[in-house]
Image: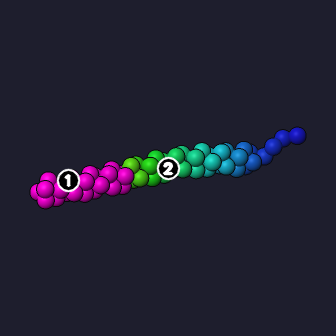
Amino acid sequence: MTVPIWIYAVVAGIVISALMAIKTGREERQLEMESIEREGEIYLKRLEEEKEKREDLRATGE
């Protein structure tokens, strides 16, 4: 019982495709996390600036 060589090629193609899909998924998740972190840093910076503005207004108003 011999298996035709093209079946090995198809199986190899499926395995390679699966590995590439996993690799791409990991890269996309990492890029998404980096983007989320940057957005979070911008948000925290804005909050800090607002807090400083409020403190300055209180200091000048008193």
The span shown in magenta is: 38-62
Determine which of the numbered discs, if any, sits on residue 29 in the image: 2
Is residue 29 shown left or right of residue 17? Answer: left
Amino acid at circle 1: Glu
Position in image of residue 15 (x %, y %): 65, 45
- The residue closer to the viewer here, 8 or 26, is 26
- Characterize the magenta stretch by its predominant secondary structure: helix
- The residue closer to the viewer here, 50 or 2, is 50
Tag 1, which secondary structure?
Answer: helix
Label 1 close to label 2 by CB (< 8 Å):
no
Farthest residue, direction right: 1
Q: Residue at x 28, y 56 (%)?
A: 46
Mark toward the start of the polypeptide (1 vs 2): 2
Amino acid at circle 2: Arg
- The residue closer to the viewer here, 2 or 14, is 14
In this view of the protein, can residue 42 be seen by the observer?
Answer: no
Position in image of residue 38 (x %, y %): 35, 51
Q: Quadrant of residue 1?
A: top right
Q: How far is mark 1 from mark 2, CA to CA?
A: 39 Å
Is residue 26 shown left or right of residue 39? Answer: right
Determine which of the numbered discs, if any, sits on residue 55 in the image: 1
Farthest residue, direction top: 1
Tag 2, which secondary structure?
Answer: helix
